[in-house]
Amino acid sequence: MNLEKKFLACRDDFPMLKAKVHDKPLVYLDSAATSQKPNQVIDTITNFYKSQYGTVHRAIYTTAIQASDAYHGSRKKVQNFLNAQSDEEIIFTKGTTESINLVASSFGKQFIEPGDEIIITEMEHHSNIVPWQIAAEERKAQLKVIPFSDDGVLDMGALKNTLSNKTKIVSVAHVSNVLGTINPIQEIVQLAHKKGAKVLVDGAQSACHMPIDVQALDVDFFVFSGHKLIGPTGIGVLYGKKELLDAMPPYQGGGDMIQIVTFEKTTYNTLPLKFEAGTPLIAEVIGLGASIDYLTQIGLADVQAYEKDLLSVLLYELQTIGELFVLGTSEQKSAVCTFSVKGVHPLDIATLSDLYGIAIRSGHLCAQPTMRHFGLTAACRASLAFYNTKDEIYFFIEHLKKVIKQLRTI
């Protein structure tokens, strides 16, 4: 079976792809914002609530034990998915944003001193900018920014020149949510580690689109969200090297993250529970496990190859539209395509596209510095997943041309 036939068959697993919008079949091109969910994930969560529900870590009755086993099983699945050394290195959070905030706060308190440096890049999502601004202000550190070129490629020369013995951490997107650029993580890690700096990789846009091996990359932290991984909302993952997580103080206090509590002193639990205060996101974690099962079965290497083919079709077809500018033309590019059309507002394009059942994103895409690089305040984004088809791309292009023509005649 070729890849196109393989992933066409996968569409039957996604009930939302059968939906209609304005009496038109839904053409969903916003997977960079959030992915659609297969029946396997939906059914797993439903079955848990209907027939397996119980708390975890707190009781010995049967359903509680079953829930705990499923919960811990999902942690093991994430470990294998990322090729982490231990499931103790897998921390469950609410999402990529909380994972980054956890590291910025906890790593910052333990390792960042006044005068130290934090490095991010110009292409980061706001969630990988603001937490580091807060950490830099609190720790009296310097925040330094690595620029990218007009074709969306990170300036590695600037990174080499900016790294110093004062650099404590480099936090960088694996894939830009605007440009689609796949950053050279192994090279970044090698350069940072030579200076004694740690590296956090924002994998929100990569974990569902390519195989991830945190040991091969040698990253110190890797974060992603379940809802972009064909899983539930409200669940995220922080991978961290055990020695770093052991050294970092808890991010929040409460139940589960303690060993002994007295009014005089509290001792904290071991990993990973030290960073998971309160009743966990049980159903969400179990649903995440189901999404990982699904992706493991279909194979992320095949996903990456198929999406690369889809992206080449999309980029080729966009070139047939006059006065349309694509943001980010790196050769190393994932299935994200952001564009601007001269004289036409992105919100208008997205609004009229919706009338044809086409779902695309418009706005600043939570990356205002990236927009400013191109002199823009907003743009349109079409982002692909393995459940998209070439026919959907042709349909999108056909109606995008109609929309642009209509808006230019107003």
Image: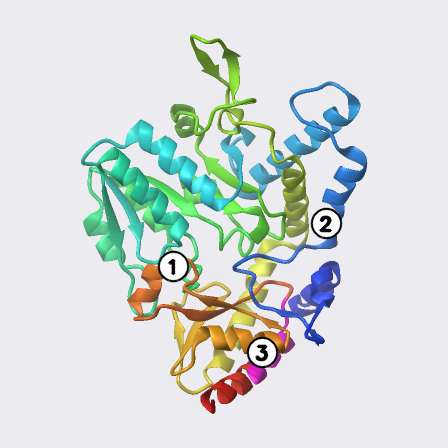
Mark 1 vs mark 3, foreground winner is: 1
Residue 395 part of the magenta-drawn span:
yes
Q: Residue at the location (58% across, 83% down)?
A: 399
Question: How much space separates mark 1 and mark 3, taking CA atoms?
Answer: 24 Å
Among numbered discs 3 and 2, the one appearing first in the sequence:
2
Among numbered discs 1 and 3, the one appearing first in the sequence:
1
Give residue 245's quadrant in the image: top left
Question: How much space separates mark 3 and mark 2, taking CA atoms?
Answer: 28 Å
Q: How many marks?
A: 3
Within-10-Å neighbours for mark 1: few <14, some 14–19, many 20+: many
Q: Position of residue 154 (x, y in %)?
A: 31, 59
Q: Nearer the viewer, residue 316 or 275?
A: 275
The residue that mark 3 highlights is 396
The type of residue carrying mark 2 is: Ile
Q: Residue at the location (78% across, 33% down)?
A: 52
The residue that mark 1 highlights is 367
The residue that mark 2 highlights is 42
Q: Does 366 appear above or below 289?
A: below
Q: Does 12 appear above or below 404?
A: above
Q: Position of residue 138 (x, y in %)?
A: 27, 35
The type of residue carrying mark 1 is: Ala
Q: Residue at the location (77% across, 20% down)?
A: 61
Q: Return the mark for residue 28.
A: none
